[in-house]
Image (spheres, rainbow, N blue to C red):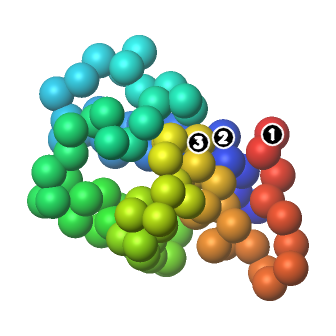
Amino acid sequence: MTTEKEIFEFLKGVLLNFLDIAPDDITPETRVADLSMESLDFVELQLEIVKTYKTQVRPAVFESGEVKTISDFARYIANQLQPQGAVAASA
């Protein structure tokens, strides 16, 4: 079972690969909006998520405020991976 921490580390690694930022600039509390990602960055990130976790992230989760931070993002993906009704571990 994939944990939120593992997903956070995955997201951090992917973001570091295509954004010009320092590793210390990506923490669980980092706001996605503060990463200055362009639309192509989101597409590349989505492709990596699909390739690794076989799930997609709806753009509406960012627009609605459901996903604000990298931690929220990891939790969202972890929840997508869980069977209906189960809660993802955050350890």
Specify the label residue 71 is tagged with.
Answer: 3
Q: Earlier in the sequence, mark 3 or mark 1?
A: 3
Rendering coords of residue 41 (x, y %): 19, 53
Q: Which residue is mark 1?
A: 91
Q: How many marks?
A: 3
Real-space CA distance between mark 3 and mark 1, rounded to the nearest whole angstrom? 12 Å
Mark 2 / mark 3, whichever is N-terminal:
2
Relative side of 78 to 19, left or right: right
Q: Which mark is residue 5?
A: 2
Q: Position of residue 59 (x, y in %)?
A: 36, 70
Residue for point 79% across, 59% down: 88
Asked where in the image residue 13 lies, by quadrant, the reply is top left
Label pair 2/1, CB-CB below 8 angstroms: yes
Q: Which mark is residue 81?
A: none
> Residue 82's quadrant in the figure?
bottom right
Q: Is residue 52 visible?
A: no
Q: Amino acid at mark 2?
A: Lys
Q: Residue furthest right?
A: 86
Disc 3 on helix, strand or loop? helix
Answer above or below: position of 57 versus 18. below
Q: Position of residue 40 (x, y in %)?
A: 13, 59
Three-letter code for the amino acid on which mark 1 is drawn: Ala
The C terminus, quarter of image: top right
- Closer to viewer: mark 3 or mark 1: 3
Residue under the image location 38 percent in, 43 percent down = 32
Tell me the element at label 2.
helix
In the rendered image, residue 5, in percent from the top left (x then y), is placed at 66, 40
Foreground disc of the pair 2, 3: 3
Inspect this view and state whether residue 39 appears.
Answer: yes
